[in-house]
Amino acid sequence: MQQPCFDIVGFDLDGTLIDTSADLTAAVNHALDRLGRPRLDVRQVIPMIGLGGRHMMGQALAATGGGDDALLDTVMPTMLDYYAGHLCVASRPFADCLAALDTLAAQGTRLAVVTNKRESFALPLLEALGMTSRFACIIGGDTLGPGKTKPSPEPILAMIDRCGGGRAAFVGDSIYDVRAAQAAGVPAVAVSFGFLAGPVGDLRADAVIDRYDQLIPTLDRL
Ligand SMILES: O=C(O)COP(=O)(O)O
Ligand SMILES: [Mg+2]
């Protein structure tokens, strides 16, 4: 078996490990329905994902007639309650993701998740897909406390610490992932199939993959 290129490989969740776009869109649309607003297409919601549910819902309000913080406060429980009850209707790992995780694990690499999704969603979602036991640690948007979410390097540094230290890389789909990783001194791999808000090159990641079967050869080159 080949020696691992990295001791630790961390992954973003939404848009990187798992395509959650349809379930997140359904939750947003449930909230918009309650407000009598027009529904959004999944392609409109995708660029709104990445900075947590409040940011996503705020963007959805902005796209459908606007709304202040008070309206956002009112509508958030509607969106969150719906999402909690429909976390894993259509959400599935991206193609060949599990095979890549298996190969890394077999090489002795410790795997981790660092997401801006709150733990109370990230943990049951990973559990529903049978993925929890693959990860040495799972850090959510509320795990470390206020402000300690990507693009801050703190959750990436906590990941390295919780995984026992060593050489790490991080895989993500947004500018928040790339900034957090690079600020923590960790190479960032961007996935071009994720929830992009623009061209993948704009993320200025250290490498880009278009499919999961490119991950390990890409890590080997970093
Ligand atoms: O919940 C979000 O908006 C983003 O989650 P992610 O950090 O796993 O992409
Ligand atoms: Mg993401």
Image: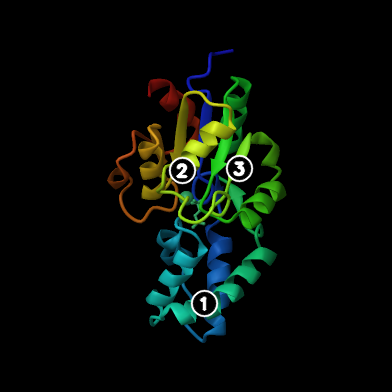
Considering the numbered disc 2 on the image, is that residue within a helix, a strand or a loop? helix
Q: Secondary structure at mark 1?
A: helix
Q: Which residue is mark 3?
A: 138
Q: Amino acid at mark 3?
A: Ile
Three-letter amino acid code at the position of disc 1? Asp
Label 1 beta carbon less than 8 Å to ligand 1: no
Q: Amino acid at mark 2?
A: Glu
Res 120 seen here: yes
Q: Residue at x 42, y 42 (%)?
A: 153
- For residue 103, the mark is none
Residue at point 53% right, 37% down?
Answer: 159
Q: Are marks 2 and 1 in contact (CB under 8 Å)?
A: no
Residue marked by disc 2: 154
Image spot of residue 100 (x, y percent): 56, 31
Q: Is residue 214 above or below residue 125?
A: above
From where the camera sits, is residue 209 visible? no
Q: Earlier in the sequence, mark 3 or mark 2?
A: 3
Pick the quarter of the image with the N terminus.
top right
Give the number of the disc on residue 73.
Answer: 1
**Above/below status of 14 relative to 168:** below
Spatial CA span between label 2 and label 1: 27 Å
Earlier-in-chain disc, 3 versus 1: 1
Disc 3 Cβ-to-ligand 1 distance below 8 Å: no
Colour scheme employed for the rendering of this structure: rainbow
Mark 3 or mark 2, whichever is nearer to me? 2
